[in-house]
Amino acid sequence: MADLLSKIVAHKRQEVAERRRAEPLDELKRRALDAPKPRNFFKAVTQPKGELRVIAEIKRASPSAGVIREEFDPVLIAMAYHDNGAAAISCLTDQKYFQGSFDDLRRVRQAVPLPLLQKDFIVEPYQIYEARANGADAVLLISECLGEAKLLDLLILATELKLTTLLEVHDVDNLLKVRPHIGFPHPSYALLGINNRDLKTMTTDVGHTLRLVDLVENLDTLVSESGITTPEDVTRLRLAGVHRILVGEHLMRQPDVGEALRRLMGRG
């Protein structure tokens, strides 16, 4: 793993251990099982086939860019996304590196009917229960952060809790590693994400998805993530059969996030 990713994962393990001392797993499990039924993130992102589906992201900051948006109200941003064509919303909950929180996630869930992806660095089963207890409908699993055995355990647990998984990869080796597990244990709960951001250099290139697309067996569940900033980027991806995208930083930098989303989708 890149040095930054290693630091993030190490801190996340410490953070989870502290939260587990504050709320033991058995108590968290009860909260998770009492939470409302998850919304169908998988269906929202994959249907109708062949149509552009955007997962619009809410994040205030990132390790590579620092603070992205000074005036930050996750509820107003979520409402703008909902009103302007987003299929689903991604919400950062990592506090140290992205200035997100579970409170952001809960407030967004109350404000809009769109299904929500909790965006964080998940390394322990405890975090899957946290996601469910705090209103997430989907979770991100980053292949570069997880060994194969742990990845499978987390996929099974997320599915048992009726959560969609977005299984993210960047490099070819990780794509080949996870490819047999896309759709495990149930096809209607798993999406594959290709991150266009190189975690070693933190640079983005939409062409990265295009270079890997021939290695993906089912384009209907493929999401291209990061670095998508123009309608031309979207067109390039769609011509290659990629109709699902996750966009965050570009939208967060625009004064009117709703108008920016419409323009990116070719509707503005």
Image (cartoon, grey):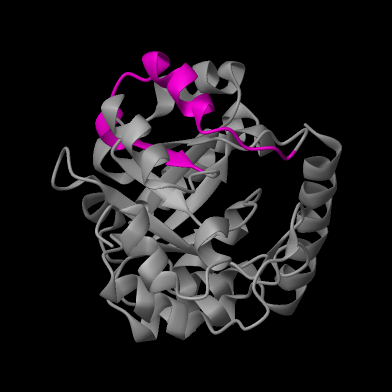
Horizontal side of residue 114 vs 155, given as left or right: left
211 drawn magenta: yes
Task: Residue 130 in the image: state x and y as whole percent.
Answer: 55, 67
Indicate whether 73 appears above or below 20. Answer: below
**Is residue 27 placed above or below 117 in the rendered structure?**
below
On the picture, is 187 further left or further right than 56? left
Direction from residue 94 to residue 18 in the image, left or right: right
Q: Nearer the viewer, residue 153 or 204?
A: 204
| Residue at image point 37% right, 70% down | 259
Position in image of residue 228 (x %, y %): 48, 45
Magenta-colored span: 202-225
Quarter of the figure with the C terminus: bottom left
Q: Position of residue 167 (x, y in %)?
A: 48, 39
The residue at the point 52 percent across, 22 percent down is 175
Please name the residue shown 71% across and 69% down the image: 20
Q: Residue 141: x and y, percent?
A: 54, 44
Instruction: Examine the rendering and report whether any part of residue 58 can be seen.
Output: no
Pick the front one: 91 or 123: 91
Residue nearest the observer in this picture, 12 or 4: 4
11 or 209: nearer the viewer:
209
- Evaluate whether residue 156 shows in this view: yes
Tell me which residue sits at (58%, 22%) in the image: 174
Asked if the stretch drawn in magenta spans residue 222, the answer is yes
- Pick the quarter of the image with the N terminus: top right
